[in-house]
Image (cartoon, helix red, strand yellow):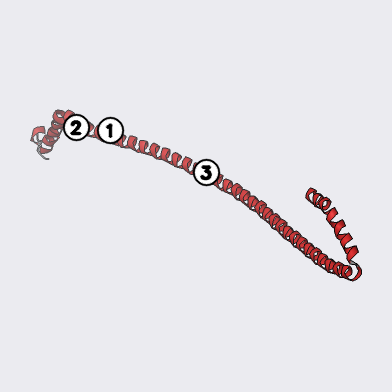
């Protein structure tokens, strides 16, 4: 059998006693230091989580603002397109009306030119007819009238001249 050693003669026991004494003496300080480190780490993590939550809320707010701006821009674009369509229709209608008015003006001008040409042609025909009539009358007068009858016709024409001139001025 092995000799029986005392409790204090065993080195393992001294290690155990030293370990227990170490934790009794320094345990509270060690525990306080460990809990302080863990509390600081927890506070840091909590602060990071709070910051992350704040950043997420800020990002969501920015996303909502961007979506609202996009929606507003889309509605403004739609309104602009609609206004452009209305303006284009108005301009097309105005162009159509102006084209019709220009066509009517050209038609009226053409009709006026035709009427002026007809009037000029009628006046030319009248002048030619009057010229032919005057020559024919001159020939008839020269061949058929005597100087006494000629004097009588001239006197009658001179007497009727004031009445003819006043009738012409009245017309």
N-term mark: 2 or 3? 2
The one of 76 and 50 positioned closer to us in this rendering: 76
Camera-nearest label, 1 or 2: 1
Marker disc for residue 76: 3
The crowding category of the residue bearing disc 2, from other C-alpha atoms within 10 Å (few below 14, some 14 to 19, many at least 20), is: few
Image point (37%, 36%), residue name? 53
N-term mark: 1 or 2? 2
Q: CA distance from mark 3 to mark 1?
A: 48 Å
Q: Quadrant of residue 100?
A: bottom right
Image point (48%, 40%), residue name? 68
As helix, strand or loop, the secondary structure at mark 2 comes to helix
Q: CA distance from mark 2 to mark 3?
A: 63 Å
Residue indicated by mark 1: 43
The one of 133 and 163 positioned closer to us in this rendering: 163
The one of 136 and 18 positioned closer to us in this rendering: 136
Q: Position of residue 143 (x, y in %)?
A: 89, 71
- Of all residues shown, which one is farthest toward the front? 148
Is label 1 in contact with label 2 (beta carbons under 8 Å)?
no
Residue indicated by mark 2: 33
As helix, strand or loop, the secondary structure at mark 1 comes to helix
As helix, strand or loop, the secondary structure at mark 3 comes to helix
The crowding category of the residue bearing disc 1, from other C-alpha atoms within 10 Å (few below 14, some 14 to 19, many at least 20), is: few
Q: Position of residue 148 (x, y in %)?
A: 90, 63
Q: Position of residue 101 (x, y in %)?
A: 68, 53
Q: Quadrant of the N terminus?
A: top left
């Amino acid at each position: 059998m092995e000799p029986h050693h005392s409790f204090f003669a065993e080195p393992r026991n001294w290690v155990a006693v030293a370990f227990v004494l170490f934790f009794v003496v320094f345990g509270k300080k060690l525990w306080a230091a460990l809990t302080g480190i863990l509390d600081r780490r927890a506070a840091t993590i909590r602060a990071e989580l709070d910051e992350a939550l704040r950043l997420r809320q800020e990002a969501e707010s920015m996303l909502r603002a961007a979506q609202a701006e996009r929606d507003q821009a889309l509605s403004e674009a739609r309104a602009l397109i609609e206004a452009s369509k209305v303006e284009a229709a108005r301009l097309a209608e105005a162009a159509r009306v102006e084209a019709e008015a220009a066509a009517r003006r050209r038609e009226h001008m053409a009709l006026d030119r035709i009427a002026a040409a007809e009037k000029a042609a009628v006046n030319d025909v009248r002048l030619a007819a009057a010229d032919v009539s005057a020559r024919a009358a001159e020939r008839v007068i020269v061949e058929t009238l005597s100087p006494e009858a000629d004097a009588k016709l001239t006197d009658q024409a001179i007497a009727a001249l004031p009445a003819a001139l006043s009738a012409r001025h009245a017309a």
